[in-house]
Structures are given as C-alpha cells and as structure tokens.
Amino acid sequence: MIKKEVVICLGSSCFARGNKQLVRIVNDYLRDRNLLNEVRFHGERCFGECAAGPSLKLDGILKERQDEDSVIAILDAFFITIGK
C-alpha cells in the first residue's frame, strides 16, 4: 500500500507565520482519525513560496495561506477523496 504524503514547509517564513501550530494540528488530526500508519507526515525546508505561507503539500499539491481552521478543512477534503 502506498502511503499518502503530507509535507509541511518548515522554512523560517512559514514557521513564523504559524506552521509550528499547524504541525501540532496535523499530527493531532492524523492521530485522532487513526491515519498515522496510512500517511507519511513530515517537514521539508522552504517550498519557495514564502509570501503565500504557511504552506503544506498533500500528495505534492501545494496548499498556501493555511491557518488552524483551513488546514482541517483541506485535510477533511483530502481524506474524503481517498475514501477515509
């Protein structure tokens, strides 16, 4: 089984704009929904889209300007599309 991938930008601009909180929210989301074994969640250095951060990628698709509310919504939509 190929795992889905969620990658969060850990560049200084995104981190200063709130990605530290988003790391916690995504981890909690995956744990609470028993998805930890089905998803590879990790951070990477700057995505190069600093003005549009905080950012994350869902299976390579960039999602910009994320906050605590929007990240839950995009994760819900992402996991609905894969049947979870």
Image (cartoon, rainbow, N blue to C red):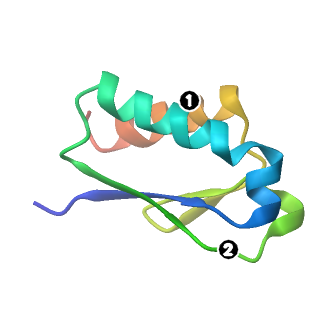
Q: Against 9, is 82 above or below?
A: above
Among the 4 quarters of the image, the one containing residue 47: bottom right
37 and 72: which is toward the camera: 37
Q: Which residue is mark 2?
A: 47
Is residue 76 shown left or right of residue 32? right
The secondary element bearing badge 2 is classed as loop
The N terminus is located in which quarter? bottom left
Q: Nearer the viewer, residue 36 or 61?
A: 36
Image coords of residue 5 (percent x, y): 37, 59
> Measured from the top left, where is residue 2 in percent x and y?
17, 63
Mark closer to the observer (2, 1): 2
User: Residue 51: image x %, image y %?
Assistant: 90, 63
Left/right placement of residue 41 relative to residue 44 reads: left
Q: Residues within 10 Å of mark 1 (few under 14, many from 20)?
A: some
Q: Is 41 or 73 nearer to us in this picture?
A: 41
Point out the residue furthest to the bottom here.
48
Secondary element under disc 1, as helix, strand or loop, is helix
Q: What residue sits right under mark 1 in the picture?
A: 72
Upstream in the sequence, badge 2 or badge 1? 2
Mark 2: few/some/many CA within 10 Å (<14, 14-19, 20+): some
Whether 72 is drawn above or below 4: the answer is above
Quadrant including the C terminus:
top left
Q: Identify the residue at horizontal 29%, vertical 44% (top origin).
A: 82
Q: Is residue 37 left or right of residue 11?
A: left
Quick one: which residue is furthest to the left in this view? 1
Tell me the quarter of the picture where residue 63 sits.
Answer: bottom right
Residue 68 coordinates in the image, percent (x, y): 68, 29
**Gap in angstroms between the C-alphas marked 2 and 1:** 21 Å
Q: Residue at x 56, y 38 (%)?
A: 74
What residue do we see at 37% from left, 38% from top? Answer: 79
Question: Residue visible at 73% across and 36% down?
Answer: 67
